[in-house]
Image (cartoon, rainbow, N blue to C red):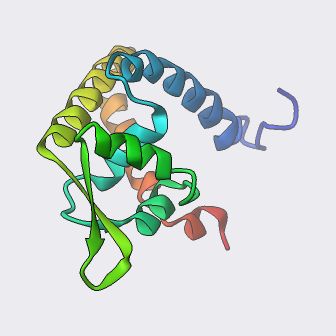
Amino acid sequence: MAGNTTSEGRPDLAAMIVPLGRALVAAELPVLREHGLAMWAYAVLLGLDDEPVRTQAALARDIGADKTRIIGVLDDLAERGLIRRQPDPADRRARVLSLTPAGRRMRDAVRSAIQQREERLLARLPEEDRRGFLNALQALAALPPSEISGD
């Protein structure tokens, strides 16, 4: 891949991470299908985490989705009893979201199955490299986008 190697002789981070990310997403798809979830539905379940309430707009922003795009996903998850959507007492126009116990179980089961698959990949690394990789990835993933882009 010409043009993506730095002066230090390593590829750019995006040149390494994007193909890996695509492969990891592809590896998640069978797990999501087994649980009857689309990728956006899983993103919603992860985005709600264990927070008691979140507005639809805040959730959409946090998971990188257009708020109108996830309405159908939210409808489906609510119909399946995985999330609750209730009017916000402070603003009746807004909806607050929360995971139901069934939603929490689904999120945990899917995350566990995905992480089992990831363990097979991570097992290819020596233990010390594996810990360092995961620690570095968590630290970088926690950065605000402005710190990553340099803006």
Instruction: Name the residue nearer the viewer: 144 or 63.
Output: 63
Residue name at image x 21 percent, y 61 percent: 51
Q: Can residue 36 be seen in this snapshot? A: yes
Say left or right for 111 vs 151. left
> For residue 66, what is the image quadrant?
bottom right
Q: Position of residue 111 (x, y in %)?
A: 28, 31
Instruction: Name the residue nearer the viewer: 98 or 89.
Output: 89
Say left or right for 119 vs 108. right
As drawn, which residue projects farthest toward the bottom?
Answer: 90
Say left or right for 104 vs 41. left
Q: Quadrant of the N terminus?
A: top right
As drawn, which residue projects farthest toward the left?
Answer: 101
Q: Position of residue 46 (x, y in %)?
A: 33, 46
> For residue 65, what is the image quadrant?
bottom right
Q: Position of residue 84 (x, y in %)?
A: 24, 54
Establish if 60 lies above or below 103.
below
Instruction: Name the residue nearer the viewer: 105 or 150.
Output: 105
Q: Quadrant of the C terminus?
A: bottom right
Q: Position of residue 114 (x, y in %)?
A: 33, 24
